[in-house]
Image (tube, helix red, strand yellow):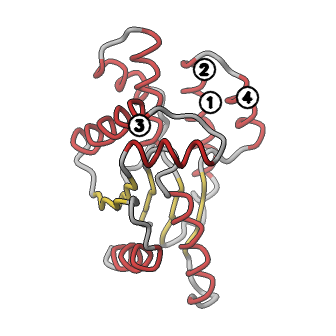
Amino acid sequence: MKLVQLVGPDASGKSSIWRQLIKDHLETSNNNSKVVFIREPNDLELINMIKESVDVFEKIKLYALDRQQLYKKFENDPPEIIVSDRSYICSLVYQSLQVELECDVPLYTAIEIVMNNQHQIRVPDLVIYTYAQPSTLYDRCVNRGEFMTPQYAQQLMRRYELVFELFKLNVIKINTDEFDMDAIIKLVNEKIRGL
C-alpha cells in the first residue's frame, strides 16, 4: 500500500488539489482501481470534541485517535494507494507550534510531545506540500472568513520545512501563489504513478 499525503498551511490549496484529484480519478479510472481518498480529521464526533476542547494536549490525543480509527478501516483490505488530505505531519506542525507558544516548551520537545501521542503512524511514500507567500495565505484566509496573520503563516512554513528535514520525507513542493490546477494535477498524478 502506497501512502500519499497532502499537507500545508491553511489556505495553501491542499484541499482544492485533493478534491480535483478525486474528480480526475473518477473521470479516468476503471472500476478495478484500488485508490482511496481520505480526509483528516474524519470522525464527526471527534471533530466536534476537538473544536470544543481548549486544552492543546487533549487536542493532540483526539487527532491521534481519529487518525488511528481512520486507518484501522484499511487493515483487512488495504488499497493500492491512499491519498490523504492532511496527516500526522500537519499535527506535528500545528500542534507542536501550539505547544511551543502556549506552554513555553522548547521546539524539539514540543515536536516530541506530539510525536509520542501518535499511534502506529506510517511514513508516507510521497508528501505533497502546498505553500504560498504569507501575504497570499492571509488574503485567502480573510476571503474565507478565517484569520491567520502573515507571521503565523511564516512560522507554519518554517515548521513544515523542519519536519520534512527531521523525518527525511519524500516531498514535492507546490507553490500555489500562481494556481494552475491543470499543471498541478498533472505533476501530482505523474508523481503518484511513479511510486
Q: Earlier in the sequence, mark 4 or mark 1?
A: 4
Q: Is residue 192 above or below residue 48?
A: below
Identify the secondary structure beneath mark 2: helix
Observer-side mark, 3 or 2, equals 3
Farthest residue in the top direction? 104
Three-letter code for the amino acid on which mark 3 is drawn: Ala
Mark 1 and mark 2 residues within 8 Å of each other at the beta carbon = yes
Quadrant position of residue 103: top left
Quadrant position of residue 43: top right
Give the CA distance from mark 3 to mark 1: 24 Å
Mark 3 and mark 1 residues within 8 Å of each other at the beta carbon = no
Classify mark 4: residues with Cα within 10 Å, few (<14), some (14-19) or many (20+).
some
Mark 4 and mark 1 residues within 8 Å of each other at the beta carbon = yes
Work out whether residue 73 or residue 66 is closer to the camera in this orientation and state it: 66
Q: Is residue 185 above or below residue 52?
A: below
Please provide percent x and percent y for residue 99: 44, 18
Please provide percent x and percent y for residue 146: 62, 38
To which residue does mark 3 refer?
Answer: 153
Mark 4 and mark 2 residues within 8 Å of each other at the beta carbon = no
Please provide percent x and percent y for residue 37: 59, 65
Identify the secondary structure beneath mark 4: helix
Task: Please give the count of numbered marks on the rendered protein.
Answer: 4
Classify mark 2: residues with Cα within 10 Å, few (<14), some (14-19) or many (20+).
few
Three-letter code for the amino acid on which mark 1 is drawn: Leu
Please provide percent x and percent y for residue 82: 51, 64
Give the CA distance from mark 1 to mark 2: 6 Å
To which residue does mark 2 refer?
Answer: 58
Identify the secondary structure beneath mark 3: helix
Residue 125 seen in the current view: no
Which of the numbered marks, if any, corresponds to residue 87? none
Quadrant position of residue 60: top right
